[in-house]
């Protein structure tokens, strides 16, 4: 049984992963390169826990006990030496991850399970420098951002790992309220990101063609398809609508929709202009610099409310 968790990287994803485990009573060792990075991560965790309490998702008296379950380290050996499960959330650099897993293989007990939160790198090259025995205990576990709120975690089952080891990890995630998606093939983007990019490609194309303004496009998505997707999967939607209808509409629409194989020119133009979205103050929308913290908080509140509501729709 997995009880002791190690998380490598206290940044955007890592701190949220540590927070999610600690919220459900797991003792977590959290590593980053220096004390400043760890402080940023733990400060973010405290702020997020306070917002959860403000929104009555947790009680305020759970904040400090949750923080107490997270120990911070700048030494990898001290972080991982007694861990049952170690997940890395470090930069998307294959050389870095290869060397990191090689180091972990030497430092961790034989039964420790390794995982990568990668969203773009293949598992096979990440395993290059580890032992044959450890290759049976390593996988991709891809969380969605923000990790402490988004229910999905994609778990790889690519043929290197026995099913009983996979089941241990699956049970771990179910114990912290996550919904796991079992991914059978090592393909770029796994499942959720490929679906998301398919939607994004058409959205960016609609903007590029001037079919509708950005606010109207987002409205069409939020109160049309995405309204159903919050509770109903695409295949279930298709079954309810009738597969014959979906086939006809597909024949009519897909031939006139975007089929590009690279980022949309309208998106690339924004990037070249330095209009990167919320973090720069402008993307497809403009953001008052003084109001950015409030905009970010409102975004998180919406996810908290949706997370509360989604519990009713989870398949038992």
Image: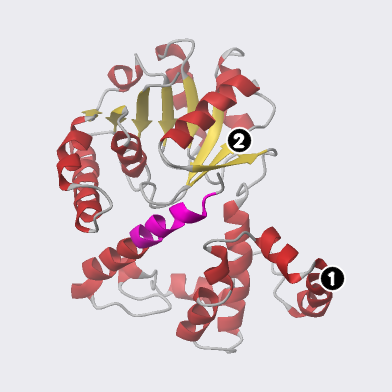
Examine the residues drawn in magenta and state their main secondary structure: helix
Could you say where residue 217 lies in the image, as x and y percent from the top left?
Answer: 52, 81
Residue 204, x across and y down, in percent: 57, 75
Q: In the rendered image, which residue does mark 2 sit on?
A: 156
Q: In the image, 163: left or right of 134?
A: right
Q: Is residue 295 magenta?
A: no
Mark 1 closeness class: few <14, some 14–19, many ≥20 residues within 10 Å? few
Q: Residue at the location (41% across, 19% down)? A: 84
In this view of the protein, which residue sits in the foreground, 268 or 20?
A: 20
Q: Is residue 161 visible?
A: no
Reply above or below: 2 against 178: above
The residue identified by callout 1 is 244
Q: Nearer the viewer, residue 164 or 79?
A: 164
Image quadrant occupied by the C terminus: top right
Q: Secondary structure at mark 2?
A: strand
User: Is 233 positioned to the left or the right of 314 in the image?
Assistant: right
Give the spatial CA distance, label 1 vs label 2: 33 Å
Magenta stretch holds residue 305: yes
Task: Work out whether mark 1 precedes mark 2 in sequence or the reverse, and give the earlier one.
Answer: 2
């Amino acid at each position: 049984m997995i009880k002791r968790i190690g998380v490598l990287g206290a940044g955007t994803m890592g701190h949220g992963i540590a927070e999610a485990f600690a919220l459900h009573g797991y003792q977590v060792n959290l590593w980053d390169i220096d004390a400043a990075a760890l402080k940023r991560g733990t400060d973010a965790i405290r702020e997020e826990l306070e917002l959860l309490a403000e929104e009555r998702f947790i009680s305020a008296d759970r904040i400090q006990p949750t923080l107490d379950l997270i120990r911070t380290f700048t030494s990898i050996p001290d972080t991982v030496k007694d861990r049952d499960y170690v997940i890395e959330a470090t930069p998307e650099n294959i050389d870095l991850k290869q060397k990191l897993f090689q180091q972990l293989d030497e430092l961790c007990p034989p039964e420790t399970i390794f995982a990568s939160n990668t969203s773009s790198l293949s598992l096979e090259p990440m395993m290059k420098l580890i032992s044959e025995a450890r290759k049976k205990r390593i996988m991709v576990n891809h969380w969605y951002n923000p990790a402490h709120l988004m229910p999905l975690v994609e778990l790889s089952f690519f043929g290197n790992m026995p099913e009983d080891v996979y089941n241990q990890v699956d049970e771990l995630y179910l114990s912290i309220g996550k919904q796991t998606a079992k991914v059978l093939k090592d393909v770029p983007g796994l499942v959720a990101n490929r679906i998301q990019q398919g939607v994004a490609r058409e959205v960016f194309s609609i903007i590029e063609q001037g079919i509708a303004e950005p606010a109207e496009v987002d409205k069409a998505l939020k109160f049309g398809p995405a309204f159903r997707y919050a509770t109903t999967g695409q295949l279930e939607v298709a079954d309810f609508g009738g597969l014959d209808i979906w086939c006809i509409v597909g024949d009519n629409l897909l031939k006139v929709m975007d089929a590009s194989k690279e980022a949309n020119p309208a998106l690339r133009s924004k990037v070249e202009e330095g209009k990167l979205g919320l973090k720069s103050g402008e993307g497809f929308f403009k953001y008052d610099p003084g109001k950015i913290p409030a905009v970010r908080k409102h975004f998180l509140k919406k996810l908290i409310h949706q997370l509360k509501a989604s519990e009713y729709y989870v398949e038992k």
